[in-house]
Amino acid sequence: MARPSSKTETAGKPNKQVKETPLNRQYNQIKAKYPGALLLFRVGDFYETFGDDAIKASRILGITLTKRNNGGAQEELAGFPHHSLDTYLPKLVRAGERVAICDQLEDPAAAKGIVRRGVTELVTPGVSFNDNVLDTRRNNYLASIHFGKSVGQEDQFGIAFLDISTGEFLASQGNAAYVDKLLQSFNPSEVLYCKRNRNEFATLFGGTPAADKFHTFTLEDWAFTYDFGYNFLKQHFQTTSLKGFGIEGLPDGIIAAGVILHYLNETEHRDLQHIQRITRLEEDRYVWLDRFTIRNLELVAAQQDGGVPLIQVLDQTVTPMGARLLRKWLMLPLKDRALIEERLTLVELLHEEPELADTLIGHLKQIGDLERLISKVAVRRINPREMVQLKRSLQHVLPIKELLITALTLPAFTESAEDASKAKSLKKYADQLNTVSFLLDRIEAELRDDPPTLANQGGMIKSGIDPQLDELHALAYSGKDYLLQLQDREIQRTGITSLKIAYNKVFGYYLEVTNAHKNRVPDDWIRKQTLVNAERYITPELKVYEEKILNAEEQIFGIELRMFNELVLAAGEYVAAIQQNARVLSVLDVLSSFANVAQKNRYVRPVMTDGNVLNIKDGRHAVIEQQLPPGEAYVPNDIYLDDETQQIIIITGPNMAGKSALLRQTALIVLMAQAGSFVPASAAEIGLVDKIFTRVGASDNLSRGESTFMVEMTETASILNNLSNRSLVLMDEIGRGTSTYDGVSIAWSIAEYLHNHPQCRAKTLFATHYHELNDLANDNPRIKNYNVAVKEMGNKVLFLRKLKEGGSEHSFGIHVAQMAGMPPGIVQRANQILTQLESSHGREENKERIKQAVPAERELALKIFEAGDPKAELIKEKLRAIDVNRLTPIEALLKLNELLNLAE
């Protein structure tokens, strides 16, 4: 494909055998400033790539890779039309490329010598304003991690997140587990870290599930210093300290945040007026959800193809800001009861006042992405049509404000003290909304309702704003009318009915006559161009009007562009107010969504307490109940846990009976409640939970040498090492990844550990196929046995999915295999083998062995040191080899099991 250009320019990789052209030199100088970035080099009407960039671009974009002779050297070349940038740029960024956009900084027609060029923007996976790159319903975070000094026995890290498209800026610091959890929660597109920490980063965060989703970029050591980061932040926010943002005591977090601002500066993003504050991410404010729990509960992403995450059920938001906020609330449930109650109270109001909710949603539906629109204003990237979208969105702020104020007169606010709290919350949001009426009036007065997308083409500004512009409009439009009159007059004079007046960039306006009528052309016409079937002419009168019209249009474009830029500058004064509006409207949107879902799916308001009781009546799984076939109802179940009488529930029952669903629905109900949502139950009393842990499902990490069982033990160890008194622990089939006796031993010891922990009585649901664990309830008063009921009908099993008190003796695994379509011969043989095994290794005999083995620590301690015991020396040797100070709880349990086996 030919690349038309106003200059005869060539560029590419430097070649020692050929003389470097001026354009080669310009290209190489620009390319050297952005190492590692793919350079889109504007040449005429095309963005070109050269050399290795061309090879990479052709592969990612599917465009033709060509070669051309450049002074005797062959060089790769690939490009696309400049107007297709919005089509191709997202593909490059999603492929993880950092893309430097090099534009022509002057008109080629007016340039003397080589056209001046420069990089106008460096777009990376985590830094973009392009609507085609961004997902409107989720944030696009750039993250930065600083490897700090050790505190005690733990390494400390600083971490910061920025969504440049919205201006949201966050900072925190903590240990590796906390940083890993934040990476999973915020799911950044790009992560920055120091070059010297490349190996540590790969070890700690490179193999995590979140790492599959983000790209990384390393920076030099000097950027990761406290003084540099602190001063950069102060300079940006124009403050004397960072105390007002609450991050003064986060030195590692300050370093990470400073690196982000430095990176923006390096990527040609210097207009950052919309980043007006940095917020501290407080670990103590939110429920702890480790990466295993976020994955296992499928909050925002399903583990299986075709699966449905929780957010898909709860997200009925109607604005992009609301959708992004809902995602954040689900990943960061609250621990502050007052804030939870405030959310629940407003959800209840909207639930009980459907007319109020419908009116509110009706206004919200008309509001665009205020956060990203006002960010584009701040960085001068907004176009005329987007400015009209901003106006139309802001026009609904006043009606919403008035709606909230009017709602305060409803009976719902006048009957009790609780109603007064509803009124207080509603009034707070109404007071925070700013109508920005002056800006609205100015946009309405100056900007047309249907302007073009590009600001340099005119047609944006209304009449009556600028006298000179009105005069030019009249001249341009009346001049075109005159051309039509001229055409009619010449037709009358010459009798050439097919005569037409047209325009092109080369000749301007001209009269075109077909060859059949050229003998009628008057003598005062001047022939300008000969075509195959026609002749083109000009006249002195035509050229005079052409000059007037073209000059008028050029002046119109200049004046309108100036006025539009002034309007953008004026809008920039309202960035903070409009960002505040966006935050309030997004909260109202999420609360309306919660109310809508609660109405639709029969959810109830949970009762939040400061106690340690979890009491759910008729609880349901929010996602599964929506996926059932028509006519099939979800079977609800009750769950009761506390720290005095029923701390741990051992749940047994057959495969496919619903044990895993019961565990997950309990966690989801707690999480939804502490996010501020109603819950799928007939009633729910929830004592505040500060940590939710889950160990469900089977997975491996073979690339890092971790088997399924190793992953299971790693996740379990993480739970046991981070328990608190208000934790909710869900364990499903612990120990199934190893031999039966090993598995039973590990599961038994873990259950005892949770029951006997000296500081923490974590509320626990423990689903298992090891029926031997039912005997734990005999010696541990806070462990209770439940099973998921089934009904046997001949050779068939009916799953009742109802939780009832007492243990279960059967797993019905062979029945499940039969249901899955296993060949009948295999099923029949499996039944025969099962009968033989049960007769030779009776369950009661197995239980008796465990009873004798597990509680015998005292007896064993005496026996080990008896004189003449042949095993004593071996056991002593293993005990001496143990480093108690470095032993984790799960390693201790495994070592204890090994010693018990030796003693037997």
Image (tube, helix red, strand yellow):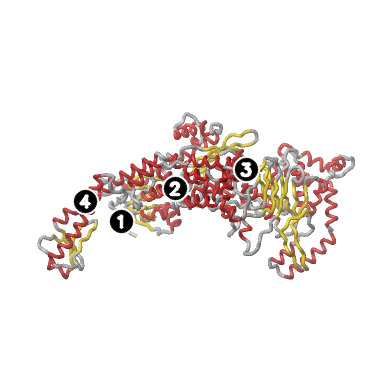
User: Measured from the top left, where is residue 216 in percent x and y?
Assistant: 51, 46
Q: Earlier in the sequence, mark 3 or mark 4?
A: 3
Q: Earlier in the sequence, mark 2 or mark 4?
A: 2
* Residue 484 in the image: above or below residue 671: below
Q: Residues within 10 Å of mark 3 (few under 14, many from 20)?
A: many
> Which residue is label 1 attached to?
4
Which-is-in-front pick, marks 2 and 4?
2
Which-is-in-front pick, marks 3 and 4?
4
> Which residue is label 2 attached to?
396
User: Measured from the top left, where is residue 298 in percent x and y?
Assistant: 61, 52
Residue most toward the right?
Answer: 868
Asked whether residue 390 appears in the rendered view, the answer is yes
Could you tell me the amino acid type at mark 2?
His
Q: CA distance from mark 3 to mark 1?
A: 59 Å
Could you tell me the amino acid type at mark 1?
Pro
Could you tell me the amino acid type at mark 3?
Val
User: Measured from the top left, where is residue 880 in percent x and y?
Assistant: 78, 38
Q: CA distance from mark 2 to mark 1?
A: 47 Å
State the quadrant of the N terminus: bottom left
Q: CA distance from mark 2 to mark 3?
A: 35 Å
Could you tell me the amino acid type at mark 4?
Leu
Q: Nearer the viewer, residue 68 or 359?
A: 359
Q: Is residue 651 left or right of residue 189?
A: right
Which-is-in-front pick, marks 3 and 1?
3
Q: Residues within 10 Å of mark 1 (few under 14, many from 20)?
A: few
> Which residue is label 3 attached to?
287
User: Measured from the top left, where is residue 519 in percent x and y?
Assistant: 12, 68
* Residue 657 in the image: above or below residue 293: below
Q: Nearer the viewer, residue 653 or 355?
A: 355
Which-is-in-front pick, marks 2 and 1?
2
> Which residue is label 4 attached to?
475
